[in-house]
Image (tube, grey):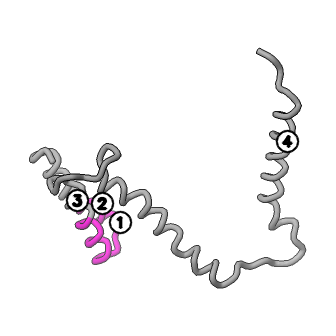
Amino acid sequence: MTGTDLWTMAVIVGLACITVLTRCFFFILDRAWTLPGWADRALHYAPVAALAGVIAPEVVMAGGQLVGTWQDARLFAAPVGALLYFWRRSVLLTIAGGMAVYLPLHLVLGW
């Protein structure tokens, strides 16, 4: 196995410098820096968008394909969990309610 060439080392050092600079950017500034109002409002939606991006494909897709039948327990458990959350704002109730719908449909009926 040959040694690391100069180009690879230059890329590694360059990426390390860029990483340190971007992570320390706010410490280097001499005055306080705030986001513009529109960016601050947009960041409030980031967690919801990320959660939807993870949950939605898991609910409506199976094996990389859209669920082709209504006999899928996830299609019933997800709305029940969402409704319970909006009703009581309890994560524990959301999980328990969703699983209370999912498990019988999946284990008993085989959906």
* Residue 101 or residue 110, whichever sits in front: 110
In this picture, which residue range is highlighted in magenta?
79-98
Badge 2 element = helix
Marks 4/2: CA distance? 46 Å
Q: Which residue is mark 1?
A: 91
Label 4: how many Cα within 10 Å (few below 14, some 14–19, many 20+): few
- Image vertical order of residue 83 relative to residue 72, above or below: below
The disc placed on residue 75 is 3
* Residue 97 or residue 77, whichever sits in front: 77
Furthest residue toward left: 109
Badge 3 element = helix
Which residue is found at the position 25% from the left and 52% from the top? 67
Which residue is found at the position 38% from the left and 58% from the top? 55
Residue 53 vs residue 30: left or right? left
Secondary structure, magenta segment, majority class:
helix
4 or 2: tag closer to the N-terminus: 4
Residue 15 percent location from the top left of the image: 80, 46
- The kind of residue on which mark 1 rests is Val
Which residue is found at the position 53% from the left and 69% from the top? 46
The disc placed on residue 13 is 4
Marks 2/1: CA distance? 6 Å
Residue 15 vs residue 61: left or right? right
The disc placed on residue 11 is none
Residue 17 percent location from the top left of the image: 85, 49
Q: Which residue is mark 2?
A: 95
Residue 20 percent location from the top left of the image: 81, 53
Mark in front: 4 vs 2: 4
